[in-house]
Image: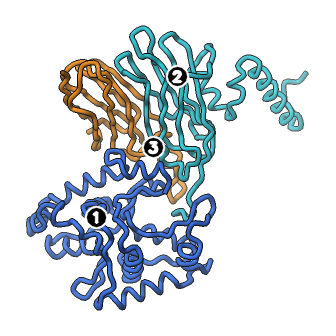
Chain colours: A cyan, B blue, C orange
Amino acid sequence: MSAIQTKKNVGRRDWLTQALLFGVSLCLQPLLALAKKPEALEAIQKIIGSNALNEGKVKLVLPPLIENGNLVVLKVSVDNPMTEQNYVKAIHIIAEGNPLPNVFSAYLTPRSGTANITTRVRLAESQKVWAIAQLSDGSFWQSSVQTMVTTSACTEEP
Amino acid sequence: MSAENKALQDDPSANPALFWLMDGQTLWKEVLGPKQKSCASCHGESAQSMKGVATRYPKVINGKLQTLEGQINQCRAFNQGLPKFAYESKELLALTAFVATQSKGLPIAVDETAVNRVDLKKGHDWFYQRMGQLNLSCAQCHEERAGLKLGGSIIPQAHPTGYPIYRIEWQSLGSLERRLRNCMNGVRAQPFEYGSTEMAQLELFLMWRARGMPLETPAVRP
Amino acid sequence: MSKTSRTVITMPDKAKRGEIIEIRAIAQHDMETGFRYDQTGKRIPRDIIRNFTCSYGGVEVFKADFYPGVGANPMVIFTTIATESGTLQFEWTGDDGYEALNQAQITVT
């Protein structure tokens, strides 16, 4: 079979490849397959490597309706004792709909006391935002929030 | 204004206008120019001398209707012998915000007087006059339809209680004149020029319309 | 010469040993994303703060990576345990040689 893809077949082959990848990833990592943007999926993959991504322990707070995505207060907290033996090593924020999915990463230590972080982020559009926590035992936990981002009427650019 | 924006606004260490206020404080004390004067040289401690000042602007001074920005520039040129700040420059915004925030919590006190009557009437007329390609007046949205929605946003009554504001859209502090120009662009009208008499008249009317409401500079708005 | 800007640290100056204290760190920075275009249609290059660290008595206790998705004038609120009296050092580094430093004293009883 010729390795050269004819114009007619390119579209269908790409679609079939995508569908196959989706199907495979759905079996291997059900949660990940539902992340819409492929770049976000890749960014999450880089963070967790070959580990499983569990749901729970992480609480992500974002306003449900965001009037302007330029400055959004984001609060993330992880239910964890924060001791030498068991602490949160890192918290990563991934935004599916942003031009770059990685938004913010915090690295904590047993001296942190809590795994509560507040920051202010930019959200380009209505999208799902993920918070992924890495614990000292190597496990990964996640939570996500679906946000609705509007833009104000009467903006500067006509 | 959403609950989130109010929380940001009320928290002095989280309010995004923080750095402009700090710059304003520095500018207030900066001794400059041929006369080697700072704002503080004449006005002393801003917390005392500027308390209540922003609630009374725009006002007629020496026959001319001045906005707070206009008066700051007037002082700069006349009393300090320095070139005026450009409108929307970081310095003018910082100084205006710094002066205005000294009146935070005080009620806006612009009343109709014999000297401002003509300008106030003109400002009133600007507010109710249709303009632009969309042929809309300020009143049609902000009086008749306040509380209803435009796109995803609730139409406010448009009281300028917190200027200069940190507008999240701008990702920066900005003046009332900038916001009014946005509005005028919105109805596809030729916007008034910065520092123009029409701007001052409209601002005078808006502040008079908001009289009694507490000043909340620097406010946070989407 | 590296560029810098103002930073503000808000945290208590006194605490009891073992108490968890909240620290707010804000830096003045536009955080130009690199995804915006100017009026001629040219892309405005990325210029952001990349990294923030907090050291307590010389030991790094917190670190953060910022990406363009962090809002202008970036703020982080985090906690640390008040272990001893001393100085907390805060450092921000970023594009175009940006560097800012700040510090705060704490008395722990």
B117 lies left or right of C71: left
Q: Which chain is indicated by disc 3?
A: C
**Label 2: few (<14), some (14–19) or many (≥20) C-alpha neighbours in 10 Å:** many
Q: Which chain is indicated by disc 2?
A: A
Is residue A158 visible in the rendered structure shown here? no
Q: Which mark is residue B100?
A: 1
Structural distance between the alpha carbons of marks 2 and 1: 44 Å
Q: Are marks 2 and 1 on the same chain?
A: no
Structural distance between the alpha carbons of marks 3 and 2: 21 Å
Horizontal and vertical percent for residue B105? 31, 61
Structural distance between the alpha carbons of marks 1 and 3: 26 Å
Horizontal and vertical percent for residue C90? 28, 30
Is residue A82 visible in the rendered structure shown here? yes
A33 lies left or right of B135: right
Q: Which residue is disc 2 drawn over? A: A133
Towards the viewer: C42 or B25: B25
Mark 1: amino acid = Ala
C34 lies left or right of B198: right
**Above/below status of B20 relative to A154:** above
Horizontal and vertical percent for residue A43? 59, 27
Mark 2: amino acid = Ala
**Numbered disc in front, either 3 or 2:** 2
Towards the viewer: B79 or B141: B141
Examine the image and state in which quarter residue A146 appears: top right
Circle 3: element type: loop
Q: Which mark is residue C71?
A: 3
Towards the viewer: B36 or A35: A35
Quarter of the image with the C terminus of chain C in it: top left
Q: Which chain is indicated by disc 1?
A: B
Circle 1: element type: helix
**Label 1: few (<14), some (14–19) or many (≥20) C-alpha neighbours in 10 Å:** many
Horizontal and vertical percent for residue A11? 84, 36
